[in-house]
Image (cartoon, grey):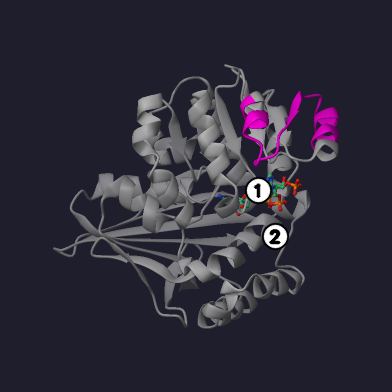
Amino acid sequence: MNTPFLIYGANGFVGAAIAHMAVQRGERPILAGRNQTKVAALAAELGLDYRVASLDDPAALDRALADVSAVLHCAGPYLYTYRPMVEACLRAGVHYLDITGEIPVYQALAEYDAQARARGVMLLPGVGFDVVPTDCLAAHLKRRLPSATRLTLAFHVDGPVGLPPGTANTMIELIPHGQLTLRRRAGRLEPGPLGGHTRTIDFGEGPVQTTLFGWGDVFMAYRSTGIPNIEDYLALPDATRGMVTIANLLRPIFALPAARELMKRTLPPGVVGSTEDERTRTRTRVWGEVVDDAGRRCVSRLHGPEAGVVWTGLAALAATRNAADGDAKPGFQTASLAYGPDFALACEGVTREDLE
Ligand SMILES: NC(=O)c1ccc[n+]([C@@H]2O[C@H](COP(=O)([O-])OP(=O)(O)OC[C@H]3O[C@@H](n4cnc5c(N)ncnc54)[C@H](OP(=O)(O)O)[C@@H]3O)[C@@H](O)[C@H]2O)c1
């Protein structure tokens, strides 16, 4: 216990929240980022050591990673930040973990699998809410029904919170990559309907309308379970559902950086940000279903805290602590491949129920 790990992007909205949670749990992470003033201020507030390194300075990154055993990379959008950090981790022989949900980034990181195995380094992206709970639920459902050929996952954030600012930015950055409509059919990633496909799901408190949404599971749960047909659904507020549909329909326009910047600046109030009090009043429900070709079906649910900050922080810290202590599998991993389907239950306040 207490082998040092590094949080990079520690002064961001989620990075700072995770740094606070870590200290509350008795951890002493080293904080890092590119902005000396902001990182130093947070480190002083929490009484922690810090290191400053820009991602475009490999020598500075090498110095930042000296004497640590794992990095929790919290600086996104990861489309622009994963490469220098994963390459620094491979040079230093340090386990790489991040909280991305970006499928193009998962795909790119998976390309480093052989190099990571050779270096004895674990690459474990997606250790936030996206995708620890859904990935572990997928693996649990596969365990319940090994013959499953269809997997559907969904979640519902029930409370007053908005998205973390980085999540909102990242979703906008992903529009031109077509992620928001992605699903997996017969083993291949393919776009779903642009107008949004809906499905009514009972998360435990009555039916809720959800919309098809390209969540990280269409990549990660496929690696974890091998189930060839995977869809994710989200219960979205009406305003957000409308914005997602418009964004999907106007996807070519969002290839222009100016269009993405405009959308970031014009997000309606309430879409972004949350206070600690709002997070405390928010619960998240995750639902998963597997079906096989004989029509057998299993459903399970997870119930847990607010997703974007609290559940993300709990899951990320649990995975990073494991990795820092040497509980790590070299190569590209998913949370359930590294730590098993029950890893979801390692997060405080998370419960699971099995239905039919
Ligand atoms: N898996 C999940 O469920 C989950 C949950 C929440 C968030 N996330 C992801 O986590 C990321 C951070 O979210 P957030 O709300 O904390 O965002 P944020 O408040 O905007 O913070 C972003 C952080 O990344 C740093 N950063 C950005 N680009 C960088 C670059 N090129 N080089 C070095 N540092 C860079 C920023 O540094 P400066 O302050 O110096 O600009 C800042 O520290 C996002 O990608 C988001 O999608 C995932």
Quadrant (top left, top right, bottom left, bottom right) of the N terminus: top right
Return the residue nearer the eye: 99 or 59.
59
Residue at 47% across, 70% down: 178
Q: Residue furthest left?
A: 294
Residue 333 in picture, x, y percent from top left:
39, 38
Instruction: Decide: is 148 above or below 40.
Output: below
Dots 2, 1 in contact, CB < 8 A = yes
Left or right of residue 59: residue 94? left
Local SS, label 2: loop
Residue at 57% across, 38% down: 85
The numbered dot on residue 309 is 1
Give the magenta-colored segment's residue range. Answer: 39-62
Return the residue nearer the eye: 349 or 279.
279
Residue type indicated by callout 1: Val
- Mark 1 lies within 8 Å of ligand 1 (Cβ measured): yes
Ranked by sequence position, the earlier of labels 2 and 1 is 2
Left or right of residue 187: residue 245? right
Residue 167 in picture, x, y percent from top left:
63, 58
Number of other residues with Cα within 10 Å of mark 1, as a class: few under 14, some 14 to 19, many 20 or more = many
Residue 25 in picture, x, y percent from top left:
67, 27
Instruction: Decide: is 294 above or below 80.
Output: below
Residue 29 in picture, x, y percent from top left:
67, 26
The numbered dot on residue 146 is none
Q: Is residue 65 visible?
A: yes
Q: Is residue 228 magenta?
A: no
Residue type indicated by callout 2: Val
Return the residue nearer the eye: 154 or 61.
61
The numbered dot on residue 161 is 2
> Depth-wise, is mark 2 or mark 1 nearer the camera?
1
